[in-house]
Amino acid sequence: MTQATQTQSKGIQLTDTALKHVLLLREQQRTDLCLRVGVRQGGCSGMSYIMDFEDESKITEHDEVFDYEGFKIVCDRKSLLYLYGLVLDYSNAMIGGGFQFTNPNATQTCGCGTSFAV
């Protein structure tokens, strides 16, 4: 795993590789968006990660916002209870590549890496 871009004081951390890839994806959208990260019920282990671009106008007072060099990651406070300390990484590997979640709160994760249990 590459070094996290920011300090441990951020509730959701991005590695340099993940930040570069997310900025590339946002550039392809041709609009200034933030990244919303959260959880929902479901998946192999009980809870699934969700992640999608969203317009900054949808940020509410119930959200926590983490700034990475002008790029915002947004997480609702309920999801943040399960995600605090999460490190989001990205891999270009042909097998097992893509975004990878390292969640210190997970007691169990599924083989695909997109769901967890607490």
Image (spheres, grey):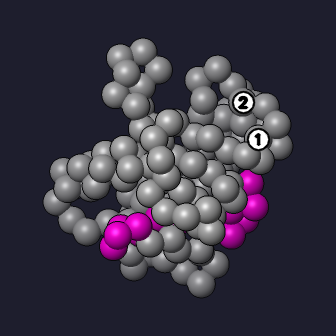
Q: How far apart are marks 2 and 1 (CA)?
A: 7 Å
Residue 108 lies in what quarter of the image? top right
Q: Would you say 81 lies left or right of 112 here?
A: right
Q: In this view, does 5 lie above or below 104?
A: below
Secondary element at tag 1: loop
Bounds of the magenta segment: 68-82
Neighbourhood count class around disc 1 (C-alpha, 10 Å): few under 14, some 14–19, many 20 upward: some
The circle drawn on residue 91 is none
For disc 2, the marked residue is 109
Q: Which of 102 and 64 is in front in this view?
A: 102
The circle drawn on residue 106 is 1
Residue 53 lies in what quarter of the image? bottom left
| Residue 78 part of the magenta segment | yes
Q: How many marks?
A: 2
Q: Would you say 40 lies left or right of 23 here?
A: right
Using the rendered image of the protein, determine whether residue 51 is visible from the camera's viewpoint. no
Q: Would you say 14 lies left or right of 31 here?
A: right
Q: Which residue lies furthest to the top in this view?
A: 95
Going 55% across and 64% down the picture, which residue do you hit?
Answer: 7
Q: Are marks 2 and 1 in contact (CB under 8 Å)?
A: yes
Going 44% across and 72% down the picture, which residue do you hit?
Answer: 67
Q: Would you say 27 lies left or right of 56 here?
A: left
**Residue 70 location (% of width, % of height):** 33, 73
